């Protein structure tokens, strides 16, 4: 089986390409990671603000959910195409749509997390003389953290996948390798780009999972007790 692939005119992967083009592959991987971090960070900041408004003014929950759901339904290629005439083939044209796609996931989980905090817990915090800000930061936020971490994991993994689509405007990181392989019918760069995208998504998901467990050790103890 190995000799067959070694002698094939267009094998799934040529290891000499991986070695010779390592600088290009590394740059694509770093760009993919940067785009993911920028998009999720911006999305998290905006989602936190929208969630704060939704939790403070309950009548805004439906409009905010409707707006974020509308953004989520816009095809990524179309959204990239809409922004390019205004911002060019820039990183901004890639990051803005990617951040927009995280909002529905993040807002939904942040709001669900804070709604999961029981009224009795809030009343106990108030009875201890906590200010509303202190209660949110020291009581409600830690209890809502498992929901937030779950939303963050989903947002990050989906963003890693969507970043590859940004290659159509020259900002796709590993997606450029995939498009290059498809354009030339050369499977090696396509295989490397796809494989590294999957590995990057798994690695980031694992890091967030570990971070979430570190931030919420009581939740893990509760599961162990059950």
Image (cartoon, grey):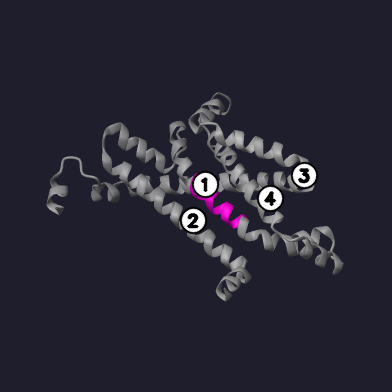
Q: Residue at x 25, y 50 (%)?
A: 15
Magenta region includes residue 51: no
Q: Are marks 1 and 2 in contact (CB under 8 Å)?
A: yes
Q: Of the numbered discs in the image, which one, if any, rests on residue 111?
A: 4
Q: Residue at x 52, y 46 (%)?
A: 36
Using the image as rendered, state which of residue 50 and residue 93 is in the foreground.
50
Mark 1 lies on a secondary structure that is helix
How far apart marks 4 and 3 lie (CA) works out to 11 Å
Query: What is the magenta range?
Result: 148-159
Mark 2 lies on a secondary structure that is helix
Q: Of the numbered discs in the image, which one, if any, rests on residue 204?
A: 2
Farthest residue toward the front? 226
Label 3, on which residue?
A: 58
Magenta region includes residue 156: yes
Of marks 1 and 4, which one's residue comes earlier in the chain? Answer: 1
Of marks 1 and 2, which one's residue comes earlier in the chain? Answer: 1
Q: Is residue 185 above or below residue 224?
A: above
How far apart marks 1 and 2 lie (CA) works out to 10 Å
């Amino acid at each position: 089986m190995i000799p067959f692939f070694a002698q094939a005119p267009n094998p799934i992967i040529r290891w000499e390409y991986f070695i010779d083009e390592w600088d290009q592959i590394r740059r694509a991987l770093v760009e993919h990671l940067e785009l993911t971090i920028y998009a999720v960070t911006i999305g998290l900041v905006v989602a936190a603000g929208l969630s704060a408004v939704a939790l403070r003014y309950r009548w805004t929950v439906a409009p905010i959910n409707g707006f974020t759901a509308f953004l989520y339904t816009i095809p990524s290629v179309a959204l990239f195409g809409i922004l390019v005439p205004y911002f060019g083939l820039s990183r901004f044209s890639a990051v803005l749509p990617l951040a927009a796609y995280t909002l529905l996931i993040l807002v939904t989980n942040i709001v669900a997390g804070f709604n999961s905090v029981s009224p009795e817990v809030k009343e106990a915090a108030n009875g201890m003389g906590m200010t509303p800000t202190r209660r949110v930061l020291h009581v409600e936020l830690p209890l809502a953290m498992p929901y937030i971490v779950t939303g963050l994991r989903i947002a990050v993994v989906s963003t890693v996948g969507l970043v590859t689509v940004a290659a159509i405007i020259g900002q796709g990181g590993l997606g450029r390798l995939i498009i290059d392989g498809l354009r030339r019918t050369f499977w090696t760069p396509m295989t490397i780009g796809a494989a590294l995208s999957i590995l990057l998504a798994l690695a980031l998901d694992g890091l967030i999972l570990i971070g979430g467990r570190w931030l919420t050790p009581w939740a893990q103890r509760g599961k162990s007790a059950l």
